[in-house]
Image: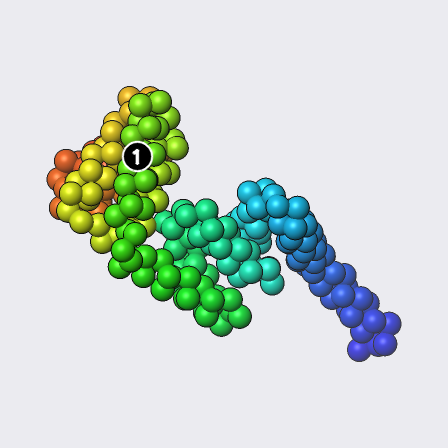
Amino acid sequence: MRIRTKLKIILSFAAILAIIMVPLRLRADQADVLYREGRELEKKGQGDFAVFKYSTIIRSYPGSKWADASLFKVGEFYFVNKDYFNARENFEKLITQYPKSSYAESARQYLENIAGMSRRSDLESAIKKILSDIEELKNEHNWGDMLRECDKLLAFEPLPNEYRAKLIEYYKTCGDVFISRESWNEAKVAYERIMKIAPDDTEALNQLYEINKLLKTATK
């Protein structure tokens, strides 16, 4: 093979490689920008805006070098704000998806702290505070926030039976309202939560089945 032909082949391969690598580099650069912006927002005390940046990295750039750090920061944000359900979800996701991450051990410690809360003497007052917030949101017909408050209570599993029954009732209330509004995705979330607490609840199982049927119909 002549040298000129070999050179053409090498240059063609280099061009193809460049086409492939450019989007990868752009994705990495965008994740860098988002993470840097998140850190700056944290320094300004705007943690809720920082979480939006980190969540974008988690959702759009899971292969980024910042993905595990972003999961940890989102989990930490929820923990500080006493949203233990979402904190636990993010810490568990971090450990599952990035087991060798330098943040994994700290995430495990947070999970132990969350689990330990169910054994602390202030458990009763913490649960009652969330219940009070749920009742207030229910009276205001603020169903979206009510659903999120129910998730906070769910993080205290295992709950005493009296609270479990109350939580199921709250989820059903939210679910039924969402069904009446034809907000099928939100209704599905509410009834999926019930199945997590009470997998033998036939009524909830049937409702979830009907919701899934409606969602499939809607996408056709």
Considering the image in quadrants, where does the N terminus appear? bottom right
- Which residue is denoted by mark 1 in the rendering? 132
Q: Position of residue 97 (x, y in %)?
A: 45, 63
Instruction: Name which residue lies at 14% across and 35% down.
Output: 203
Considering the image in quadrants, where does the C terminus appear? top left
Frontmost residue, 106 versus 216? 106
Q: Position of residue 215 (x, y in %)?
A: 33, 33
Establish if 4 lies above or below 149. below
34 relative to 123 in the view: left or right: right
Q: Position of residue 26 (x, y in %)?
A: 70, 54
Can residue 122 be seen here? Answer: yes
Can residue 86 be seen here? Answer: no
30 relative to 160 in the view: left or right: right
Instruction: Name which residue lies at 43% across and 59% down.
Output: 91
What is the residue that sits farthest to the right in this orientation? 4
Establish if 39 lies above or below 205. below
Q: Position of residue 80 (x, y in %)?
A: 47, 51
- Circle 1: element type: helix
Name which residue type carries label 1: Ser
Establish if 115 lies above or below 33. below
200 relative to 152 in the view: left or right: left
Instruction: Name which residue lies at 17% across and 40% down.
Output: 165
